[in-house]
Image (cartoon, coloured by chain):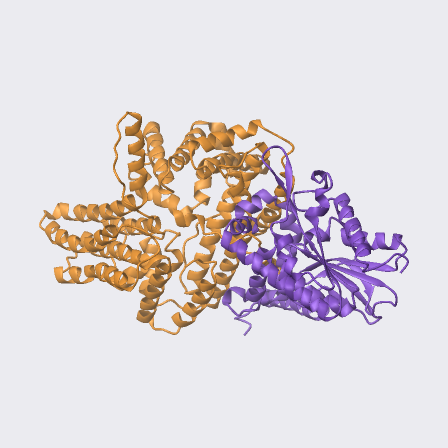
């Protein structure tokens, strides 16, 4: 179910009204049912995979904490994915094509896990915790790797072998990417690692934990929540606060504006400019990447705002994912402002475990490059995403190695003018990054760069540029208006008539959007 | 109550409600039929208290602005031309309906000719306009027959039905103010600032869908059946009121692949033959233009430049005189 569908416009109010009528336990069951319904609207069969992840990480974390569970309990709960998949097979054959054995294997895995689980308890105590962590991480990463990257790496390998004159000739299984898998597996991984590190307690209630993994507002595109941030809010009944309702509605309104007005209308230009059939020239290459910059920002931060707003209506606070990213003055500043929960995830679970910046300059750069390349690959199974990660690693290295650049990002050492120059420079770097991100392959990227050599004045780009301005300027004005509050949706420092005018404008601009409904970009990651 | 509803939220509600109220109270007439996309019988016809009728650009009816007396003045030969963007023309003055009036008056005939053509109107929406036009006593109706716009007719009908339905996806657009805002942005910003290539790729306009549908032989047969059925109904309606009808079939210019061009009536000339009879006359654009160097007359293979419009007007006037529908000095 999409946030910008009429189904969601009915689903959310019904959910909120019912939620606050129920006692705590009832709310958990309602959240769980609603989340599975929300996800199942895409393809109910893949709930089996979500259930498998939930079962494995639930029992895995308890084992890491030294709390052994009975085989009967694990097997009983572990049968849920298979039971669900069997029910789905009986009920209908779905639209999303995937070979059945893949889903059956995923659904059967908890039963295999139950056997492995008891076997691991026979290991020496000192190795048990680590073994359970590896099993938990391994099963998450195998699922993510297989569904997201198997075809990509197999096809790449086939292409390399073909270059060496060796025809692999294998037939690849048809695998589709389950939406949200990158987000919920990362959330589950952080849960297991935090329990292993002793900074979080494992959940003892399967249904609460299942609601944590599948919480519908952030299930398919984040924010990626940590155990200590979200689970405690589910483990005790939320208190109804009218301020939460106001904040939630503001977030949803801003999210709709960003998605429907800014992102979808900028998408018209970006899709044209980055279409392989378009004969690109300089102005359109620039306009296309400017449009894409605001498309992806409006799309993803709009999604996050709606997610946070929806959760807030249920009394649950989700973490901020964006903080004026295009005002960043350096690459590291950008990653503190863009997809914040993912940046921090990679920092805490990849960069720091690799050694972070504690082991000298060379190792710091090595850790940086590994982290950024993986972050790039996380975004999709394509070499352009890896290259995008590499590009940011190179930028971070450049800023680290060049004191003049690094100083541009330090507010305390710079007058406002220099800070702005730093932000403009960083925005230019960001645009190049988005071109790498948006191009489907390296040939297209080369074509995009080459287009700047052709400034053919006969191609009409002036009016499309007005179109871009028309959709971006209101967003920038809103950002400047909320800059003082350091919060993209907070206008509390304005008198109420101004706030009323701002909300009215947001409604009108969103309602007047012409572009057709476009799926959220981050669903594909 | 105050805790639930903040002043800024109430102010927003008041602004939106006020805008809606103003539209519904003060702009009701101009909104009338706007969202019926050409299926409202009276949209675009404004009958004034002084006995005149204005043709205006509202309600999905993009008429050229014109005014005429509601009862036809005595002795006046009144021509009404109904059709799509071809007779609508690049401007009112240069369109063939207006030029027919000019030419008839130049012959000393007391005549007036009105352009009731609208871009994208297919056979059914032309019939709906005809029903209203017949109330204004035309002496002759010219039906410009084409089969290029049946797709639009069906699409706009679906849009009109969707707007009327209570499906949740239409709830927001129940507000006339929001709907009008949406339409204004589409017409004044989107169509003017976003190039056609971009719109086609984004699938925001239906050009691609129309082209695809037109490539399907079964769909083309359905469209031909619609044109045949509704044109027959239109002819019957006019004849029942004793009004003569001139059926003028459209023609397109095509590249023959060898550096030349040819004219294609797409079966329309044959299609209208069974409708001809007493008081029903026929002219073929293909026949008219075939006798000329037609290539420079077309602006885009479908529409005519002013000189092409003048040639059509000239042929119509000659036909009226030849058939003695009218005579010089009348």
Give the residue at x 45% y 44%.
A338
Colour that chain A carries in the picture: orange
Image quarter (top left, top right, bottom left or bottom right) of the N terminus of chain A = bottom left
Q: Position of residue A222 (x, y in %)?
A: 39, 52
The percent coordinates of residue B311 (x first, y second) are: 77, 46
> Can residue A489 be seen at all in this image of the molecule?
no
**Quarter residue B131 falls in:** bottom right
Return the x and y of residue A231 as percentages of the image width and height.
32, 59
User: What percent of the width, then of the height, locates residue A196?
Assistant: 23, 49
Query: In the drawing, does residue A253 fall left or right of residue A388?
Result: right
- How many numbered marks does the figure carry? 0
The one nearer the camera, A171 or A258, is A171
Is residue B129 shown to the viewer in this render? yes
Residue in the foreground of this view, choosing between A97 and A236: A97
Q: In the displayed structure, would residue B143 be above or below residue A409? A: below
Judge from the rendering whether residue B11 lies leftward or rightward of residue A10; answer left or right.
right
The residue lying toward the viewer, choosing from B212 and A7, is B212
Residue B48, located in which quarter of the rendered image?
A: bottom right
- Residue, x 36% and y 65% (percent of image)? A34
Q: What is the residue that sits farthest to the top in this orientation?
A: A164
Chain B drawn in what color? Answer: purple
Q: Is B312 placed left or right of A70 in the picture?
A: right
**Residue drawn 39% across and 47% down?**
A524
């Amino acid at each position: 179910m999409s946030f910008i569908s009429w189904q969601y416009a009915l689903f959310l109010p019904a959910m909120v009204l019912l939620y606050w009528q129920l006692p705590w336990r009832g709310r958990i069951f309602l959240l769980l049912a609603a989340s599975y319904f929300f996800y199942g609207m895409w393809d109910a069969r893949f709930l089996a995979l979500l259930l498998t992840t939930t079962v494995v990480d639930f029992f895995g974390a308890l084992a890491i904490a030294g709390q052994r569970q009975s085989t009967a309990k694990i097997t009983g709960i572990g049968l849920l994915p298979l039971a669900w998949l069997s029910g789905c097979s009986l009920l209908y054959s779905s639209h999303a094509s995937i070979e059945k054995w893949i889903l059956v294997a995923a659904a059967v895995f908890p039963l295999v896990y139950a056997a492995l689980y008891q076997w691991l308890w026979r290991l020496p105590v000192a190795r048990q915790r680590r073994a359970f962590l590896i099993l938990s991480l391994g099963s998450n990463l195998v699922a993510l790797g297989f569904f997201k990257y198997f075809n990509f790496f197999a096809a790449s390998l086939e292409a390399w072998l073909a270059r060496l004159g060796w025809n692999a000739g294998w037939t690849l299984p048809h695998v589709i990417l389950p939406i949200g898998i990158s987000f919920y597996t990362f959330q589950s991984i952080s849960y297991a690692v935090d329990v292993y590190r002793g900074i979080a307690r494992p959940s003892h209630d399967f249904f609460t934990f299942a609601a944590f993994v599948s919480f519908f507002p952030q299930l398919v595109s984040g924010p990626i929540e940590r155990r200590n941030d979200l689970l405690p809010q589910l483990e005790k009944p939320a208190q109804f606060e009218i301020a939460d309702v106001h904040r939630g509605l503001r977030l949803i309104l801003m999210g709709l504006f960003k998605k429907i007005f800014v992102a979808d209308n900028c998408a018209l230009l970006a899709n044209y400019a980055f279409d392989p059939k378009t004969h690109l020239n300089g102005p359109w290459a620039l306009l296309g990447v400017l449009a894409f910059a605001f498309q992806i920002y409006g799309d993803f931060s709009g999604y996050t705002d709606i997610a946070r707003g929806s959760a807030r209506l249920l009394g649950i606070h989700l973490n901020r994912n964006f903080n004026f990213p295009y005002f960043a003055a350096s690459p590291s500043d950008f990653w503190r402002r863009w997809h914040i929960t993912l940046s921090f995830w990679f920092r805490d679970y990849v960069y720091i475990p690799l050694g972070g910046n504690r082991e000298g300059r060379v190792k710091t750069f090595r850790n940086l490059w590994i982290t950024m390349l993986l972050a790039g690959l996380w975004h999709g199974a394509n070499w352009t995403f890896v290259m995008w990660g590499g590009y940011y690693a190179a930028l971070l290295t450049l800023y680290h190695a060049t004191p003049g650049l690094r100083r541009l990002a330090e507010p305390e050492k710079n007058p406002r003018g220099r800070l702005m120059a730093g932000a403009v420079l960083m925005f230019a770097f960001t645009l190049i990054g988005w071109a790498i991100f948006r191009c489907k392959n390296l040939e297209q990227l080369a074509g995009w760069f080459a287009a700047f050599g052709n400034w053919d004045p006969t191609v009409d780009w002036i009016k499309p540029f007005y179109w871009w301005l028309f959709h971006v300027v209101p967003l920038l004005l809103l950002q400047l208006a909320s800059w003082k509050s350091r919060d993209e949706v907070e206008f509390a420092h304005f008198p109420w008539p101004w706030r009323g005018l701002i909300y009215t404008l947001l409604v009108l601009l969103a309602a007047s959007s012409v572009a057709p409904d476009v799926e959220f970009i981050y669903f594909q990651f | 109550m105050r805790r639930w509803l903040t002043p800024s939220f109430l102010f927003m509600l008041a602004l939106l409600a006020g805008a809606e109220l103003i539209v519904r109270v003060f702009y009701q007439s101009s909104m009338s039929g706007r969202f019926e996309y050409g299926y409202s019988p009276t949209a675009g016809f404004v009958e004034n208290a002084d006995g005149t009728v204005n043709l205006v650009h509202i309600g999905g009816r993009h008429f050229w602005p014109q005014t005429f007396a509601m009862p036809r003045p005595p002795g006046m030969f009144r021509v009404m031309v109904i059709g799509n963007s071809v007779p609508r023309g690049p401007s009112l003055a240069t369109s063939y309906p207006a030029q027919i009036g000019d030419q008839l008056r130049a012959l000393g005939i007391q005549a007036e000719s009105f352009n009731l053509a609208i871009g994208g109107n297919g056979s059914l929406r032309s019939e709906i306009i005809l029903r209203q036009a017949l109330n204004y006593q035309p002496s002759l109706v010219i039906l410009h027959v084409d089969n290029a716009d049946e797709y639009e007719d069906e699409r706009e009908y679906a849009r009109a039905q969707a707007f009327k339905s209570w499906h949740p996806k239409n709830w927001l657009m129940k507000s006339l103010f929001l709907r009008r805002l949406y339409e204004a942005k589409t017409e004044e910003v989107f169509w003017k600032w976003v190039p056609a290539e971009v719109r086609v790729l984004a699938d925001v306009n239906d050009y691609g869908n129309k082209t695809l549908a037109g490539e399907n032989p079964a769909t083309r047969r359905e469209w031909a059946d619609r044109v045949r059925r509704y044109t027959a109904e239109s002819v019957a309606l006019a004849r029942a009121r004793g009004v003569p009808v001139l059926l003028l079939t459209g023609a397109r210019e095509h590249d023959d692949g060898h550096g030349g061009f040819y004219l294609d009536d797409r079966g329309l000339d044959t299609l209208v033959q069974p409708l001809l009879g007493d008081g029903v006359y026929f002219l073929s654009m293909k026949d008219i233009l075939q006798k000329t160097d037609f290539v420079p007359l077309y602006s885009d293979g479908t529409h005519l430049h002013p000189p092409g419009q003048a040639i059509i007007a000239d042929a119509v006037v000659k036909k009226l005189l030849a058939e003695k529908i009218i005579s010089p000095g009348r």
